[in-house]
Image: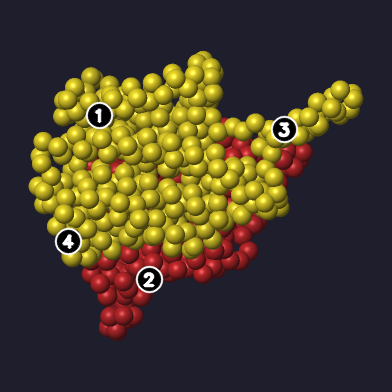
Amino acid sequence: MIWVETIINGVLYGGLYGLLGVGLALIVGVMRVVNLSHGEFIVLSAFLGVSLVGVVPWLHPLALLLPVALIAFVLGFVLQAVLINRVVTRPDPFAGILLTFGVAVVMRNLMVEVYGADPRHLQAGRLAQASAGIGDLHVGVLPLLILALSVALFTGLQLILTRTRFGRIVRATADHRDVVRLMGVNPGRVYNLVMGLSLALASVAGMLLAIRASFTPYSGVERLLVAFEVVVLGGLGTFWGAMLGGIALGVAELVGLRLDPNAGPLYAHLLFLVGVLLRPNGLFRGRS
Amino acid sequence: MTVVRWSLVVLGLLAVVSAPWLIGEGTQRFLSEAMLMLAMAQMWNLLAGYAGLVSMGQQVFVGLGAYCLFFASISLKVAPFWVLPLAPLLCAAVAAVVAVFMFRLREAYFAIGTWVFSEVVSLLVSKTERLGGERGVGLPTARLVDPRWLEPLTFWISAAIAVASVAGTYALLRSRVGLGLMTVRDNDVAAASIGVDVWWNRFIAFVIAAAGCGLAGAVSFTATLYVAPGFAFDPNWVVAMMIIVIIGGIGTLEGPILGVIIYFALREALTVVFGLSAGWYLIGLGIVAIAAILFEPDGLWPMVRGRLGGDWLSVRREPPAPALELSAAAQAAGGVRSSPTEFGATPGDR
């Protein structure tokens, strides 16, 4: 029974991992840029959550998801418009990596200076302890809620990209940046919106993760690594693949911790290495 | 010209040899750190600037080199400097095995793959009590070295490693391997089509870079007499290498030298003169790196060289003579100019 519970918890945790990665998958899929500051934005949104809880302590942290996501959207829009759009058209594939790497270094150390290096945590009150059970199986209510929210966001993103005019424009821009110009689309503006969307998703993941685990300004590195593993395992630019990749990593991590209590994320990393070496195009390659 | 060059070499050698008597211990330590950092940055530059491999896991070799030196020295009960050659050998061997797997990944995938590999090694070392676990180990065998000579020896070895990293990279890039690397970097499909072995060239660069980082890392931790996974496999090693190379000039041999000077000058200026915390210094460096990528994507060195003039450590080659004659003949005949053959890689060159 303990194993069933471990695997269920891994799936629930992995849904959150999937959410960490899906924003990055979106960026990689649409503009072929790997945003190395993705992890820093995840941590920044958690700090924003902590700050907002200080301003409005009577509101539940989950109610702050929307305002933090809006702030993250604006930050992403500005980041793309001011910095990344300047290098995105360069033929050098590393310009984007190196630029966002610089942004990550600046953000990480600014957060250390502003918030200090102590571990922080978002309090979710009674909800964090609540658990639901069928027979002997006990599962936390909050992880279930988080997984439901992740699935809802994934579905929403999928619907936006496949069913709306904006989604069509985004997919067309991803396919042919130069051709969409002929149809009156400004690819730079599309990228701004996509980066905003990516970081809004990242901020939701960052807030939810801050409820489940503590974080410091240095956590961005680990978050980025998880996000990237999710993207690569899931297959470049596929969203449900990212979800499955996240779940695979979550299960590997929790099962690993059950077998070997001080392993940390070792087994998740090993799964990633084995997976990527066996199938360099991702485990769950499908339609984007 | 040769007389001037040789006298410069002799003067430099004299300066380095006599330095421990002329400058204080603190300055020696600072210069050793800077020179080891230069060697690591040069290795990262060889990978990213010439082999087209952006590795974000170079810190794994820094850490492995340090651990190899510590455990070889402790188990053989000899002074750490005697087992120094083992560190680059181990790192080269590990890199040779890792390359077989990692080279299946391209560009950003390779970057993250190497990084994850480094994290895995770091976690495994932290879990292994025999290697000191998370707490790390000291270097008791350092007592076998006369304490008066510990600092000067570290200084001389660091200087030798720094010079070797620059001279070695220069020699490598002037060789057939270097020519192959540059054709691969510029266009790997075209390089393969004229018979350049893309995989093999990258493999050589990766193994050399690993050995270089391992050697520099081993010496670096000898100076601190203590190694722990959190410091040895710290991603900040590769962060420093990347920032130095980006600011100085990626894909030039002089770039990392200029980058190291800026990196340490800025650090001393901000932390010592202005008394700012290390955080603000890293913020400043990050902003300089962002500005460099936006406005001087080739780094500061090409700009500086423009002011200074001269050829410095350029690895540019003269076009092969027959092509010149042909183009001259074509021009004389009023024909079309032949296409530039600056990097005239002949078939089979690698």
Letter of the chain that mark 2 sits on in the rendering: A
Q: Is residue B347 visible?
A: yes
Residues flagged by tags 1 and 3 on a common chain:
yes
Mark 1 → mark 3, Cα distance in angstroms: 43 Å
Residue bearing mark 2: A251
Residue bearing mark 3: B321
Check whether the beta carbons of the residues at disc 3 and disc 2 lie within 8 A of each other: no
Q: Residue at x 11, y 36 (%)?
A: B148
Q: Which chain is drawn using yellow?
A: B
Check whether the beta carbons of the residues at disc 1 and disc 3 lie within 8 A of each other: no
Mark closest to the chain's N terminus, 1 or 4: 1
Q: Is residue B181 visible?
A: no
Q: Amino acid at mark 2?
A: Val
**Residue A195, above or below B295:** below
Residue bearing mark 1: B17
Q: Amino acid at mark 1?
A: Val
